[in-house]
Image: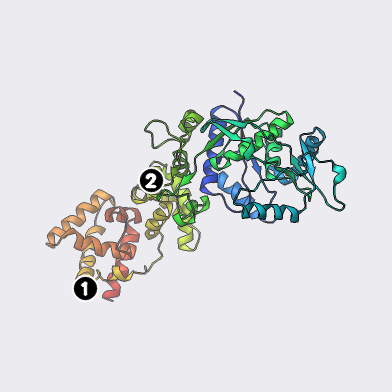
Amino acid sequence: MNVVTRFAPSPTGTLHIGGARTALFNWLYARHWHGTFRLRIEDTDRKRSTQESIEAIFDALDWLGIDWDGEAVFQFARSPRHREVARILVDAGHAYRCYMTSEELQRSRTRAKNEGRVWRYDGTWRDRDPSDAPPGVTPAIRLKAPREGHTIINDHVQGEVAIANAELDDMVLLRADDTPTYMLSVVVDDHDMGVTHVIRGDEHLVNAARQSQIYQALGWTAPGFAHIPLIHGTDGRRLAKRHGATGVEHYREEGYLADALVNHLLRLGWSHGDEEVISRDSAVHWFDLPAIGRSPARFDPERLSTLNRHYIRNTDDVTLARLATGHVASRLARNVDDEEADLLVKAMPVLKERSRTLVELAQNSLFLFHRRPLVIEPKAAKVLDRDAVMRLAALVERVNCLETWDVTSLEACVRAFSEECSISLGKVAQPLRAVLTGSTVSPPIFDVLALLGRDECLARIKDITQAAHP
């Protein structure tokens, strides 16, 4: 089956979670059928479209691993083609020039509002002789839409949808200022790009009926439509800023892995049995339109967090360290050198077991890169009383004698020391954590000792013990 899908965002902001899911579903469907996935930037709103937003969309799709085929298409650049098609429709008798002024249209809308009815264009110029046109009025071009019967959409998700033609007026195709409307531009672009399937949010369902009328008037074959359910927040209301961040870039900045976010987006409205964790390859293999439900899906930050933790734990150490390096450097306010980068890789097995995001992982790794003398946090300083510092001074002599500096040897030594002192392990471990990390929170203390190495550990402990007893 020949399949061509497209994602067509408006560059008026960053990529929204809903847009990312739409892009993903189109990408998956094309890849599943070994078809083509195209990107079209619908930049006809010249006042709100920005280059910054275009770059943000490209960057977000690239981060998510959603690649497109061929060059991105920019809708505004195709305006001459849209105008050409509008005039073809006029010449064929399927569209006409409407000379109603903006003032007349506004009076008509006001009258409908006062009468308590939905305003629709009444077809004043539908069959009127253009010779009656008032002087000095530049016309818009409207579609001569069918007035009887229904427009039927056989939707791959919603099923058969029938919309009465009486509810759809003669839409504007070309405005009086010669700018094409969204409805016309989308139809022409989808046709010219060879799009076979339009997968988008179900808020566009009525648009599908309007666009189908344009396809019919032009004698073109309409693509298959699949209108997917909206995304809601955990409260069951449409996802919005009140639910927290709704932009893809936020989740990237907060340290979520692209694969985790893709996995969560995939499960918003689509399912494959009881599978929750789905690899990208499996998603491409399994994805198809019949498995998309009609009910709104819920974006669950907690579920995303759980998935992210899974992906962090199952990402190889070198890759994970590379992904975390930027977050580490940001918190250190300096670059991470090659030696430190190698240490970060070495620490991954310990760090990733305790981290839900790359941000947490980076925060948990900072003890590795602190420059001496460490700054001790106030809470950590409280555990470094006189007795604790004296015990650390005695412990230095013990651990320095170890032949091997590894987790097993270090744990055995510290435990034996605490038993000889008749104190709990915590009475030794917490002061040790404070002097080695500057904090009361860290990975397991014996892993900390092993990762920092003999020389660095002894130096950090001596910085405290010698300061207490110069």
Q: Determine whether, in the image, residue 137 is placed left or right of residue 449.
A: right
- Determine which of the numbered discs, if any, sits on residue 119 in the image: none
Instruction: Identify the residue at horizontal 37%, vertical 43% (top origin).
Output: 310
Q: Quadrant of residue 87?
A: top right
Alpha carbon separation for disc pair 2 and 1: 46 Å
Q: Where's residue 265, x and y in %?
A: 47, 42
Determine whether the residue tagged by mark 2 lies in a helix, strand or loop: helix
Q: How is the image coloured?
A: rainbow
Check disc 2 and give the amino acid type: Arg
Q: Are marks 2 and 1 in contact (CB under 8 Å)?
A: no
Q: Where's residue 131, x and y in %?
A: 88, 43
Instruction: Identify the residue at horizontal 42%, vertical 48% (top origin).
Output: 236
Residue at the bottom extreme? 470
Residue linked to disc 1: 386
Q: Where's residue 137, x and y in %?
A: 83, 52
Q: Quadrant of residue 419?
A: bottom left
- Identify the image quadrant of the N terminus: top right
Residue at the front extreme? 115
Determine whether the residue tagged by mark 1 lies in a helix, strand or loop: helix
Residue linked to disc 2: 303
Check disc 1 and give the amino acid type: Arg
